[in-house]
Image: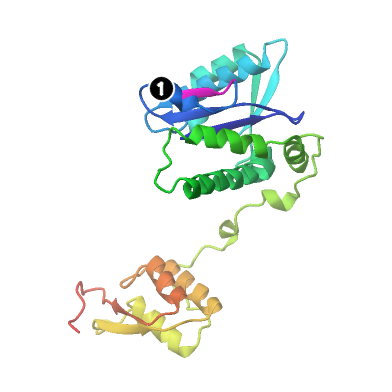
Amino acid sequence: MTFVGIINASGHYIPPVFIIPRKRWNDSFMRGTIDGSKGILHQNGWMNGECFLETLQHVHEKTYSSVENKILLIMDNAVCHMNIHAINYAIQHGIIMSLCHPILRQSSSPLDVSVYGPFKTYLRSLQNDFTLMNPNTCITEHMLPEFASKAWIKSSTPTNILSGFAATGIWPINRLIFPDEAFAGAEVTERPPPQADGQELPDLNPDWRLLLLLLLGSQHKNLRPTTLQLAPIPPQDLQALVTSQRSLQTLSGPSPKLLHVLLARGERRSVPAFSPRMRKPSPT
């Protein structure tokens, strides 16, 4: 089931939308929900283009938006929102859609900043209390809208909603709420390109340099399959070890991900290292 919460900058909320994973409607789905809530049936219970169109219709019915009385709808840039019929409906009914920046989606959405956190806490508490009071009864999807409505009433208070809009700089407007560093590219894009030839190993201790050469298969033609005992490694050496294994691209033993997991666990495990010409490890 998908829960769609809608709030505004005045500190109020619109009755939520529930996307229920069913094909046939049952009145019990909306039992105990907030008056005016909307239930949408979908096969897997996830948001898609058709459900988003019905959600826009629900927003229009509650806000009375029009071309003369336009509203601003701030949402994330999920693929499920990309629907030409929904866009045309928004244009015809005065709904201006603004997408959050993909890098700052969780920091620029008032719901994610100050509402959904308490909402999940209250919802988890309600489910735990129900399980303790009814140990022989399982929570079904028919009960989730009622639990979500109770948690939504407790979490979507004017204080939480207004603090979410203020923390994101939407209202009151604060264009300097996010520093320039927040829009910087990922650190991985700032790394220099690896050298194809003449790549040198990082400054590791001699034992780990030898281990790295064996794991990468090296360039020795006489290298035979062997079994290496991996021991714990310091974090700085671990990062350099995995980085070098990826950049050389001559993997003949464990993958970088497997090597990272084994070394991070700090356990001694037997890992076969293969020669470029060998396919099977030698019998132990």
Q: Nearer the viewer, residue 35 or 180?
A: 35
- Estimate the x, y position of residue 159 in percent, counting from the top left: 77, 39
Q: Amino acid at mark 1?
A: Asn
As drawn, 78 above or below 228 = above
As drawn, 227 above or below 64 = below
Q: Nearer the viewer, residue 269 or 276?
A: 269
In the displayed structure image, the side of residue 238 where residue 224 appears, left or right: left
Residue 104 seen anywhere in this rendered image of the structure: no
Q: Residue at x 56, y 15 (%)?
A: 89
As drawn, 99 above or below 269 = above
Report the colour scheme: rainbow
Q: Residues within 10 Å of mark 1 (few under 14, many from 20)?
A: few
Residue 146 seen anywhere in this rendered image of the structure: yes
Q: Residue at x 60, y 35 (%)?
A: 150
Could you tell me how many numbered marks the image carries?
Answer: 1
Q: Residue at x 51, y 25 (%)?
A: 52
Q: Nearer the viewer, residue 205 or 155?
A: 155
**Is residue 162 covered in magenta?**
no
As drawn, 76 above or below 274 = above
Q: Name the quarter where the N terminus is drawn.
A: top left
Q: Which quadrant of the structure image shows residue 24? A: top left
Check disc 1 and report the residue beneath it.
26
Residue that protrudes farthest toward the bottom in the picture: 206
Q: Which quadrant of the structure image shows residue 259? A: bottom left
In the displayed structure image, the side of residue 259 where residue 222 appears, left or right: left
Q: Regarding mark 1 in the picture, which secondary structure is present there?
A: loop
- Estimate the x, y position of residue 185 in percent, counting from the top left: 62, 52
Q: Which residues are magenta?
A: 36-40
Q: Name the quarter where the C terminus is drawn.
A: bottom left
Q: Which quadrant of the structure image shows residue 56? A: top right
Principal SS element in the magenta part? strand
- Estimate the x, y position of residue 173 in percent, counting from the top left: 81, 35
